[in-house]
Amino acid sequence: MARKILISAGEASGDFYATGLIEALRRRRSDLEFFGCAQPKMLAAGVRPVIDAEKLGVVGLVEVVKHLPGIYGEYQKLLQAARDEKPDLAILTDSPDFHLRVARHLHEMGIPVVYLVAPQAWAWRPGRVKPMRRDLRKLLCIFPFEEAWFRERGVPTCYIGHPLARHIAPTVSREAWYAELGLDAAKPLVALLPGSRRGEILRHLPALCDAVRQMPGIQFVLGTPPAIGRAFFANQSLPPAIHVKEGRSWDLLAHCDVALAASGTVTMEAALLGAPTVSFYRVSALSWWIGRFLVDIPFYTMVNLVAGKRVIPELMQDDMSGESLARETLRLLHSSQERDDMKRGLLEVARVLRSDQDPFELGARIVDEILDEKIATPADSAS
């Protein structure tokens, strides 16, 4: 009889992690049926969707308010599907504001919950630890410093390693990439990665377009996730110098000279592919003001947090402008020393994140053990 697993990912980065775990689980056993909140890669991997994943892709303390009715509707649908289908286990990926609430109800239903990609409770809202301790059978974290932090606070945690460090790679050579896009190999190439959600892309595009206009003679490729697609940008009045490429961010990062990347998973991808990067992010003024009182970290990008120092520039909120983006980009393009120094820092970050075991295989083993009831208590070590 098939074992049912509810699996949910609320955004593009979670899509990669969840899909990798699905594929690893299927290599271990053939009796699994997956359903839940599915992004494009998860759909291709055979996950049966029961809610609209696109409605969950909202960022910002204030921005989310107007989307709450739609999010709440999908939340209720997901819980009803869990009640109706009674899965043997649930895997919730990132998106903590949504998934920690889901986890509480799943726990009450007696469904063991595995949480993939730890919420950044060590940076802000440490009160999340209490429900995590109560509701999660296992937390799978992908950054090395997180395991001890969560375990010290009673959350059953296992560090599996960062999946990107083992799996990320370009699919074509630099020559093939330039030929495919019709680019001039003699001119610099700058990657534009404004985000994976429509709202954040719209907040970032004006400054990015302004920066492009200040850098004539440079080639720009804007990378967009498959969930957004090229059509979204048709009415955004992009400068003619910008080429839009869908779903190929790893090739773009591997072969660009500099990347302008929204703070998030894509900056880790850039680090692991060795792309000199300028990070940025912008939310509403009110969200930024509130967030300043809640967040207690020395850096905003995970690249710098893992390194413990400033490896890549961070242009956050009012510091993000066309002028500042262009200035930082040209600084890197004009100085091979600056690029080389940054690449050395990125190599060190990549070294720290690599693990001996395949993170997806280790995660699948943990899930498999829970399914077979081989873990005696929630606090047992998975290692």
Image (cartoon, rainbow, N blue to C red):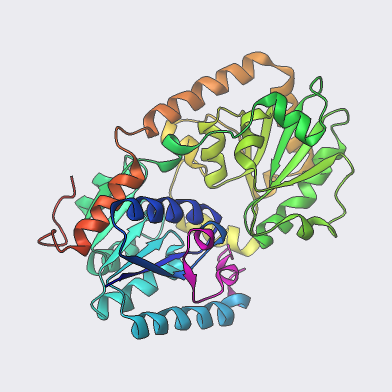
Is residue 244 rendered magenta in the image? Answer: no
Q: Residue 335 versus residue 142: which sits nearer the camera?
A: 142
Q: Residue 30 versus residue 319: which sits nearer the camera?
A: 30
Q: Quarter of the image for the C terminus: give it.
A: top left
Q: Position of residue 68 (x, y in %)?
A: 56, 78
Residue lying at 63% horizontally and 19% vertically, measured from the top left: 338
Q: Which residues are magenta?
A: 42-65
Asked whether, in this view, residue 145 is left or right of residue 214, the answer is left
The reply to whether residue 263 is in sight is yes
Q: Position of residue 57 (x, y in %)?
A: 58, 65
Residue lying at 58% horizontally and 80% vertically, measured from the top left: 70
Q: Residue 251 versus residue 28: which sits nearer the camera?
A: 28
Q: Quarter of the image for the N terminus: give it.
A: bottom left
Q: Is residue 149 above or below residue 338?
A: below
Q: Position of residue 285 (x, y in %)?
A: 66, 60
Residue furthest out toward the top: 337
Q: Is residue 129 above or below residue 207?
A: below
Residue lying at 53% horizontally and 63% vertically, measured from the top left: 43
Residue furthest out toward the left: 376
Asked whether, in this view, residue 320 is left or right of residue 299, the answer is right
Task: Name the quadrant containing residue 192.
Answer: top right
Is residue 57 rendered magenta in the image? Answer: yes
Q: Residue 135 versus residue 33: which sits nearer the camera?
A: 33
Residue lying at 38% horizontally and 64% vertically, measured from the top left: 92
Q: Is residue 72 above or below residue 158?
A: below
The reply to whether residue 315 is in sight is no
